Amino acid sequence: MSFSETNDALEAYLGDRYSEDDWVEPRRLLFSGDADNAESLKNLRVIRKMYIPDSPAKSSVGIPASRAVGRLPKSKVHKSRRLSKAAYKFILHEAEEDDEDEEEEEEEEVGEVGLSVQSPKATRLPGPSAKQRLAATFDDMATRFEQNPQNSSQGRQDPTIENRMYLLNVQRTTADYIAAHLRKKEFPVTVSAWVASQLYVVADSPKTIAESLPTSLCLAVKDYIRITQEEHEAVERSQFEFPIPAWVRIKKDKYRGDLAQVFENLPNGAVAVLIVARDFPYPMPRGSRALVERSRLPKNKTVDDLLHDDQVVGWKYKGECYYKGLLLKTFPRDRLEIVASPHVDDIRMHLDSEWNKPFLKKTLVAFSKQFLRAGDCARVVEGSLRGELGTVISTDHALGIIVLESAFDGHLKETEVRLQDIDRIFRVGDAVRVIAGSYLGLEGNIVQMSGDIFHVCQSVTNEHVEVSKYYLDLRPLNHTLNSHLPAQQFFEPLESDSIQIGDYIEVLEGEHMGRRGVVNWFAKGDTCLWFRDILTADSTEPDDTLGSILVPAGIVQRTDLRKTLQFTKDKGYDVRPGDVVTVARGLEHGAKGVVQSVDFPNARLTLLCEGDYSIITVPITFVIKVRNAELDSFKKDIGQEVFIIGGHQKGFRVMLYSLGLETCTVAVHGQQRTTIKLYDVVNKYGKRLNGAMLEGPELISFCDMRKKSYLAPPCRSITPPPEKAPSSSLASNIGPIPSSSSGWSTWSGSSGGLDVTQDSSSSVNPISSTHQAWTIDQLDIQDNNDARAEQLKDSGPLPWLREFSSVFLKYHAMLKVSPIFDASLSKRFVSTTCPDPFCGENGPAPEDCVAAFCTSNSAGAAIKHYHIPAIYLSPAPPRKKNQECIILNGPHRGLVRHLASCSIKSSDVKINITPTVTVTLRFDQICLLEPTR
């Protein structure tokens, strides 16, 4: 019998006369056996004898009660007949009346002289007395106790008794620990969805729960409240099961913030999910995130294959199951939250595993449709309107519908269509932007479509890349040429108080009331927005790992207004070309770069972004100034040659004499000085004197113009060695000596050495066995050919310097020099010139040479410029992390990234291509870069 059953039996038997405090001692002795039923029964009998003595009929003497009483003094009779006061609380009042009657009759008999042989005349009610009924109850409880071997104090429940649910109010800081401990003891536990410090536990009694907890956690439980059956059912209904498959985010523990696929719903509120492992069954660098590889596990019987439809889909090793490299792990349901549409960069490993391809494809499609906006083209692919083509008028992602405008019988009609029933339309020539993957942020135009893979031509470098169509967003690239206006112009600012991407907001109503975060997405014309929850009302620290939340735009307000550029009466918009700014609001949120031009009438500016060097146009009020243009940096160009790229003197190389706010003074060599706008003058690095950097076609044209401004060096030829007249004895042995005109047909100078051609008349007499130093034989010709072939084979950095020429407009490539060229440079790095690696201070470099410079070894450390043949150059390796390098080989070739780590001992580096993709490369696969100053 359990603890709760004992209380119920006593309460049912005694009714209103039951007092729980009076039964403390019997209950304590009843459950004092600690799983020893015999000991508990013995204690029960002791307490029975203590309060209920044996009846006279069961005495060992076997004489009538009246005789036994007659032999005793009156005082003894009263003492034996009257029970102790402590026993009265176990006896019904109806038994007291019978006892009084019996005592009166017995007193009369004792008062008579002598012994009486007559039987006592006791009046009894029909049926058993109250004491007999109570004794029978104890006997029945003891019998049931012997027949039931289970002990409730051990945390085990009687399966025949309906389990009850108790509400535990605990200290909030210990709620997770108590829930985890009770789950280990196989108690069904539900964490309250309304109050974080409340737990719902199913058990037979509070005592069972308390004894299952250690002392430290037991003291943290404030009280145990038994809830009604209706409340019990309501709590169970609130614990819905996750759909399979679905995306969930882990909210706590080591995997906090990670995304996983729901694999199976388990009993007692547990969920099995597939997640990217953090702990590996083989050695891996700390913090690695990768799929578990079958090839790295032992090839023996310790690894078991997991089959599905007669195909191997995973393996089991050391008790852990792996499906396509994903770890199968179990979490409580309350530690998971549903993610409707995750960002594809957050599930990169899941996509690589290819587990459940249909579900992954559905996720990619849903992600792409989040960027569908008014004006985009779409086609209906499901339903009665299948094949209908139209233009998106509005979207409602919360309801999952869009309004599509299409032509029907020559008239335009608007139709509501489910979002899942349409497909985005792309066309060759569309301007797009990559919104996910390794090419994130790249902008260009579609040049070819092959299924789900599109070929995109990058706008800046004209490089072709292959990108999934689900990673693209239609983006019109409107390039406008704005006239250059003075920095100080005053126009009334444009009013723009709408919420933009990147704004800090707070939710004022609804289920997410009080949440604060940053707007992730808010399409023009939409009524709802997505924001990332980074600070909730009950937390003190931001959490970037929480997912995006969809709320109506009408119930949020902007908070923590950023200090963006604003219009003032005294300065207007305090921005000019050359200033470094970062975009704080809008679609270009997070972009950083240098201002190229400012359109003051429309309050917009053009920005050259860092990293991908894309050109974007944003409102002035959306940016924050990082630093002003470094106009003083151009003072070092005074007295140096600069180039005019605009006006009637375009193309001239001139001398710079002075700088002003808007103009500068220059002079063509041998002519008078003149004044020209800063915008039309460029220094040797391709930077306008107003601070703006040339980009794209303008920079390429400048490099060509700069090369043409130098005079080509005159052609030179190498003087042939003097002919040595042979002695008379030698002449008699080898015959007549050929003339010089026939012996040396051609001499030409080249960076590779001598280029000679031998006439047939200059061949050595075959009968001669003596080698002549001044005579070119067949062996010399072969050596020369081998040297030229080797030169063509090893052309050094020329191929990638030309291929990635756009990168070297902003960076110096660091190169090592062979001691064959100059031993003094062999232990140092040289830098290529900018913006053209093939044109430096000494003019254009000869063919197959590179223009480079380095500090001199002489006093003063002056800069020395060289033209170095490419065959003597090789990429310089990095020396520490965080240095910038360009990738020369592999699928990411041409990308410029900072080093995550650098190991000189193993001659390799690790580079973060994206936040989730890291590659390891050798030193010969990268080249060290240095930004231009």
Image (tube, rainbow, N blue to C red):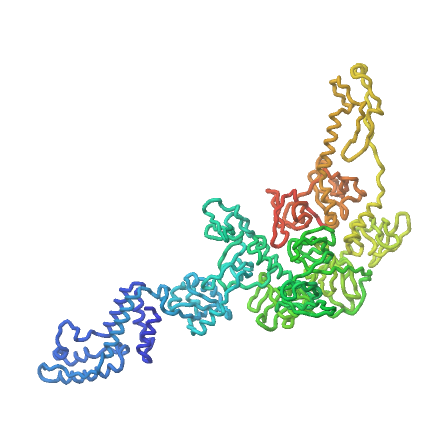
777 left or right of 11?
Answer: right
Above or below, comparing residue 910 to residue 27 in the picture: above
Q: Position of residue 332 (x, y in %)?
A: 48, 62
Q: Is residue 738 left or right of 828 when viewed as pictured? A: right
Reply above or below: 124 against 365. Answer: below
| Image quarter of the N terminus | bottom left
State whether residue 409 appears in this view.
yes
Give me the residue at 27% from left, 82% from top.
Answer: 93
Q: Residue furthest left?
A: 114
In the image, taking residue 88 as reference, residue 153 lies left or right, namely right
Q: Is residue 558 visible?
A: no
Total number of numbered labels?
0
Q: Is residue 536 above or below residue 443?
A: below
Q: Where is residue 130 shown, x and y percent of the image? A: 25, 79
Which quarter of the picture shows residue 815? Answer: top right
Residue 924 in the image, given as x and y percentages of width and height: 65, 42
Residue nearest the observer in this picture, 298 or 851 = 298
User: Which of 327 and 452 lies nearest the eye of the viewer?
Assistant: 452
Outermost residue toward the front? 409
Q: Residue at x 83, y 57 (%)?
A: 660
285 or 405: nearer the viewer: 405
Give the left or right position of residue 236, taking residue 805 as reference. left
Q: Quadrant of residue 613?
A: bottom right
Residue 463: % across, % down: 72, 50
- Which residue: 76% across, 23% down? 773
